C-alpha cells in the first residue's frame, strides 16, 4: 500500500490472531516512533515494549478500556515525564500523539492492526513496566494481526463529513 492507502486502511483493531509480529517488523514500527517529530526535538518519550503473554495480561488490567492489550502480539507503553504546567503537558502529549500515529501508520503498512488506550491505574502500570518515579505511562498501543478482517482502505469511515470539518479560506 502507498502512504495514502495505508492511512485510509488504518482503523482501531481490538482483536488479534495468535500470530506473533516478526522482530524486524516490530523494530521497524518502533524506529518510526523514534523518528517522529517533537517540540524542539526534545523527544520526551520512552517506549517500553511487552510481548510476554503474562505481562500483557497483567497490563490489560490498567483500565477497563485496555482489555485488548491481553490478546495483543505486542504492546508499546508510551512513557513521558510528569509535567505540572498545562503548556508543557499539552506539548508532551501532542508529541506523543504524533509518535503514536506514526507507529500505528507504520504498523498498518505492514498489515498489523493497533489500538491506543488510556492508563488509569498508574501504580499497576509502574509495577509491570518498571519506569522511574518521575515518569508516567501516558498511553498504551496494542499491536497485532486483525482477527476480524485484513486492513484495507475504507471507503466510508465513521467520520464527520468532509465539508463539516474542512473550512477553506476561513471559518
Ligand atoms: C487518545 C485516544 C485514546 C483512545 N483510547 C481508547 C481506549 O482506551 N480503548 C479503545 O478501545 N479505543 C481507544 N481509542 C480509539 C478510538 O476510540 C478510535 O480511534 C475512534 O473510535 C475511531 O475509530 P477508528 O480509529 O477505528 O477509525 C482511543 C483513541 C485515541 C485517539
Image (cartoon, grey):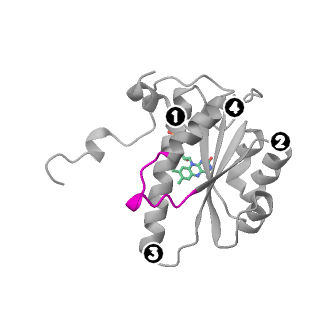
Question: Tag 2: Cα neighbours inside 10 Å, few (<14), some, or many (≥20)?
Answer: some
State the CA–CA distance, disc 3 to disc 4. Answer: 37 Å
Element under disc 1 = helix
In the image: residue 88, left or right of residue 144: left
Q: Could you tell which of marks 2 and 4 lies nearer the N-terminus?
A: 4
N-terminal-most mark, 3 or 1: 3
Secondary structure under tag 4 reads helix
Q: Judge: label 4 CB < 8 Å from ligand 1.
A: no
Q: Please identify, in this view, whether the residue under mark 2 or under mark 4 is nearer the observer.
A: 4
Q: Pointer 1: what residue?
A: 106
> Residue tagged by mark 4?
23
Q: Select label 4 or label 1 by which is in front.
A: 4
Q: Is residue 113 magenta?
A: no
Q: Which residues are magenta?
A: 35-45
Magenta span: chief secondary structure: loop
Please provide percent x and percent y for residue 52. 81, 42
Q: State the CA–CA distance, disc 4 to disc 1.
A: 14 Å
The residue tagged 3 is 86
Amino acid at each position: 500500500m502507498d502512504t495514502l492507502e495505508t492511512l485510509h486502511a488504518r482503523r482501531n483493531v481490538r482483536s488479534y490472531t495468535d500470530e506473533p509480529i516478526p522482530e524486524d517488523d516490530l523494530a521497524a514500527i518502533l524506529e518510526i516512533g523514534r523518528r517522529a517529530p517533537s517540540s524542539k526535538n526534545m523527544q520526551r518519550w520512552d517506549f517500553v515494549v511487552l510481548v510476554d503473554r503474562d505481562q500483557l495480561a497483567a497490563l490489560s488490567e490498567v483500565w477497563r478500556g485496555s482489555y485488548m492489550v491481553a490478546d495483543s502480539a505486542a504492546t508499546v507503553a508510551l512513557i513521558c515525564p510528569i509535567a505540572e504546567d498545562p503548556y508543557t503537558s499539552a506539548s508532551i502529549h501532542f508529541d506523543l500523539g504524533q509518535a503514536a500515529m506514526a507507529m500505528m501508520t507504520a504498523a498498518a503498512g505492514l498489515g498489523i492492526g493497533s489500538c491506543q488506550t488510556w492508563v488509569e491505574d498508574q501504580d499497576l502500570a509502574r509495577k509491570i513496566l518498571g519506569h522511574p518515579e518521575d515518569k508516567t505511562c501516558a498511553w498504551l498501543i496494542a499491536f497485532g494481526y486483525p482477527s476480524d478482517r485484513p486492513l484495507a482502505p475504507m471507503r466510508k469511515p465513521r467520520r464527520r463529513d468532509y465539508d463539516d470539518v474542512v473550512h477553506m479560506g476561513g471559518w
